[in-house]
Amino acid sequence: MKLTIDDVRSRFIKHFDGATGSVYASPGRINLIGEHTDYNGGFVFPGAVQQGMIAEIKPNGTRNIRAYSIDLKDYAEFSLDDPKGPSASHFRYLFGVAREMMKLGVPVEGFDTAFAGDVPLGAGMSSSAALESCYAYAINDLFGENKIDKMTLAKVGQATEHNYLGLNCGIMDQFASVHGKAGNLMRLDCRSGEFEYFPWNPKGYKLVLINSCVKHELAGSPYNDRRKSCENVVAAIAKRHPGVETLRDCDWDMLEEVRGEVSETDALRATYVLGEKDRVLAVCDALEKGDYETVGQKMYETHHGLSKEYEVSCEELDFLNDIAHDCGVTGSRIMGGGFGGCTINLVEDNLYKNFVETAKAKFKEKYGKEPIVIDVVIGDGARKLC
Ligand code: GLA
């Protein structure tokens, strides 16, 4: 499905008595490599996709947000000034973003809004970051004279997850949604906030997502436990090495020093993160040389680490990864937080057709339904449409 302005505008007009407002969009994301490295101060390699969220918004002269979710056919009205906010999570994103923008001093007023998206939910493509970034961008434009810079807008989305949804996520998803640029991946140093655009045009290869349709629900999930494990290891290392703040600052020797002091599980999680740090750097080198074989090999290694060390895979994703390997696909791995969602695959053009057909057929034979194939087109970040 390709969502258009009209899909949203027609519903907005119907719902809010013929009025029109301003329309904004913000995308979901893919990530080439660097998974669970963002909250460990490491590097990530995301890009925005063409699928995203579109919202129409019109100030209504009250202190209330009146919001209509087109996809869920759900409506709610809630006050900007009542700290409790709405209970449904799809409205809490809007509420959280508005409140976080108020904290930054933006004079947010009440508004009417309708929104819809074409990022598959629970696929690990960051539909929630798309929603947060769309409203952060819109509120900055409508009420804040665009004074808030883009990285701060991304942090508003992240703070919304932490403070209103209970998910202690990193910055990657919101960063990618706000900063995306068509045709470019971005390498972000999550410790310093510095980033670079990397034109993405791998001649002879495609990126394709295979959505297992196993719904991943990160909020209230073991995601926060993974983050806690990393922090436990850092706390043990910091006792001997003051100044160490995240796993970014740690090396293999430091992990060995504390192996007896942390739980086996925590040590295993840290093993994954240290390995992933090395892999991201290897991929950066390989990309500069146009060496996609190495990029792909590192993607398989990441999958192995996410499955066996970080333990955020599931049977269906491991199965899709095996199929990719058997079909000669250059690289394949779980994308995003894990626990379901998609694999991301780097596949040579001439193997593409056989791979997607085999993946669909074998998956259906085993699980009774076909996975969804999503060709990756790298799109633009948050913007005003009209
Ligand atoms: C989720 C989080 C991100 C990041 C990824 C894993 O998408 O929102 O911050 O941690 O998982 O790389």
Image: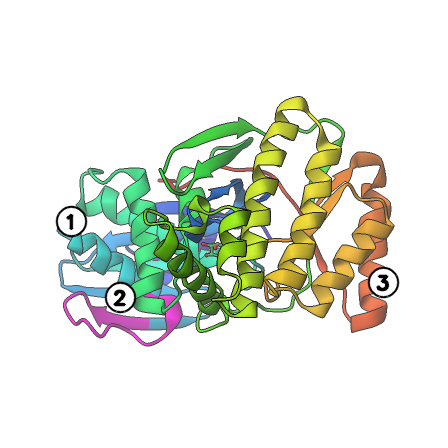
Please report the bounds of the magenta region as a residue range: 76-92
Q: Along the line of sight, which residue is nearer the eye, 313 or 160? A: 313
Residue beneath label 2, please?
66
Residue beneath label 1, please?
106
- Residue 317 belongs to magenta span: no
Query: Does residue 294 appear anywhere in the picture?
Result: yes
Q: How is the image coloured?
A: rainbow
What percent of the width, then of the height, locates residue 18?
30, 57
Identified at 21% across, 53% down, the residue is: 101
Drawn side of residue 249 relative to residue 325, left or right: left
Q: Nearer the viewer, mark 1 or mark 2?
A: 1
Identified at 35% across, 72% down, the residue is: 75
Residue type at mark 3: give it: Lys
- Mark 1 burial class by Cα count in 10 Å: few <14, some 14-19, many 20+: many
Residue type at mark 2: give it: Arg
What percent of the width, then of the height, locates residue 215?
59, 69
Residue beneath label 3, please?
362
Q: Secondary structure at mark 3?
A: helix
Q: Quadrant of residue 94?
A: bottom left
Q: Along the line of sight, which residue is nearer the eye, 15 or 244? A: 244
